[in-house]
Image (cartoon, rainbow, N blue to C red):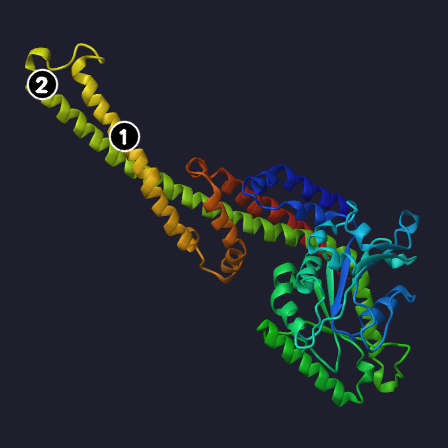
Amino acid sequence: MDDKAFQREIHDKIKKNIAPVFTGFDMDISWLEASMKWKPLVLVIGGYSSGKSTLINELLGMEVQRTGQAPTDDSFTVITNEGNSLPEEIPGSTLINDPRLPFTGLKSYGQSLISHICLKNVPSSLLEDSAIIDTPGMIDSTTERDRGYRYLDVIGDLAGMADMIIMMFDPHKAGTIRENFSVIRNILPERAGEDRVVLVLSRIDECDNVSDLIRSYGSLCWNISQMTGRKDMPHIYLTYSPKEARLEEKHAEWPQEREELKKKISGSQSMRVNHILENVDRKTAELEMVCESMYRFSTKTRRLLANTFKWALLAALVLFLASFALIKAYFPDQTEGILPDSLFSTELILPATLALLALISGWFWFSGFRFKRLLNQTQHNPESLVSLDSDYRRNIWSRVRNHVLELLRKRSLKQHLLQSRGSLNKVRRFIREDLKKYYSRMGQKNEKLKP
């Protein structure tokens, strides 16, 4: 199965079947194009002096990024190989305005970020089909200077774009940085699947002995478990600077560990389809809950209208019969028969008018009072629209709750009344049939790739 053909199939299916539903509920669909645009991306994040630039230079086999113990670079640097189609370096103002690249959404962060982002075009074979994003080091909030832009939000947006995220830790500060906590606890779970995150403990050659390494490794594991709330730990790769390290016989396994890490990063292209499916899964699950919420509110609205109309119709019938009987009683000479000779007879005009007024009053009672009360009650308790019987659904609801409230507020009564189940059925059919089929095909491909 060709990955690009598979991506195109997924893209076309969503554009044809699901994109109109996203648009109909005022939900962004630009993520679809962004996740398939350009090349697979590897995002490298971590604290200052955690070895990010050293690892990137070694992967590329050339000195691209400055290295050092102190902070050496406070910019986001996109590193790739575009040959002669791009100059050697592109400033942020050009980078984020190039529609061929997936970074146009970063314009919202303003000039402070634009002046701290660039692209480097380097002649590396590894980057012909991928790109690496080096990032400014994370710092503690107690010593943080004003960056001029929302750093963690930018990290979140880039994590959402990235097909692989390398998170690096310094053995001397194994996970204690405040921004590390925010990224691991909040940002990565929201924006990236676990299989896309690779944890790396770097500079292990700086540990004085094996005991120091074990303490650093154990400290990192403990910190990560506290941040994630999980007891089971993912694999943490170990690496070092081969130029600085003096390996001995007892370090025989270290080079193998580094080679596995380099092989993992080099295979980032294979993560693209997985990333796309994760995005589709996440976004369609959010869309399903929005559709479900709005359909349930629409159902409540229609039931309330039916109930109001029932009482208005009963009132109209009582008024019609009572007024007709009174006319018969007080004007017997004008109403000799039991039934009028014509629908437009004089004795029907008053009863029909009173009945019509009752129906009109019922509508105003519904639209001016009962519907507004229902809307107000729902806005105070929107959870009444959905079943939150699992952590999975509660997590989805936390992401769409504000959007549902906005839709409730801005949509007209007519839109609420006319909301059908068709959109919800279409989304559920896609999730349970098409998306399930795509995951199955992806699983079959992964099985074939296993040694």
Tell me where residue 373 appears, x and y as whole percent.
34, 47
Q: Is residue 1 left or right of residue 188?
A: right
Judging from the image, what secondary structure is the residue with disc 1 in?
helix
Q: Is residue 407 left or right of residue 79?
A: left
Count of all numbered marks drawn on residues in the image: 2
Tell me where residue 97 appears, x and y as whole percent.
77, 48
For marks 1 and 2, give the CA distance: 23 Å
Seen from the viewer's position, the closer of residues 77 and 142 is: 142
Q: Residue at x 91, y 77 (%)?
A: 243
* Residue 199 in the image: above or below residue 426: below
Q: Residue at x 18, y 25 (%)?
A: 320
- Is label 1 in contact with label 2 (beta carbons under 8 Å)? no
Q: Kindly give the residue lying farthest to the top in the view shown.
A: 341
- The residue under label 1 is 359
**Which amino acid does the dot numbered 2 rest on?**
Lys
Please indicate, yes or no, whether residue 2 appears anywhere in the rendered image.
Answer: no
* Residue 394 in the image: above or below residue 352: below
Seen from the viewer's position, the closer of residues 95 and 188 is: 95
Rate crowding at label 1 as few (under 14), some (14 to 19) or many (20 or more) other CA atoms within 10 Å.
many
**Which amino acid does the dot numbered 1 rest on?**
Leu
Seen from the viewer's position, the closer of residues 284 and 151 is: 151
Question: Mark 1 or mark 2: which comes first in sequence?
Answer: 2
Q: Tell me, for residue 328, which label it has, or none.
A: 2
Examine the image and state in which quarter residue 13 appears.
top right
Examine the image and state in which quarter residue 335 appears.
top left
Q: Tell me, for residue 156, which label it has, or none.
A: none
* Residue 205 in the image: above or below residue 270: below
Please indicate, yes or no, whether residue 61 appears anywhere in the rendered image.
Answer: yes
Tell me where residue 88 appears, x and y as whole percent.
91, 55
Rate crowding at label 2 as few (under 14), some (14 to 19) or many (20 or more) other CA atoms within 10 Å.
some
Looking at the rendered image, the quarter that the C terminus falls into is: bottom right
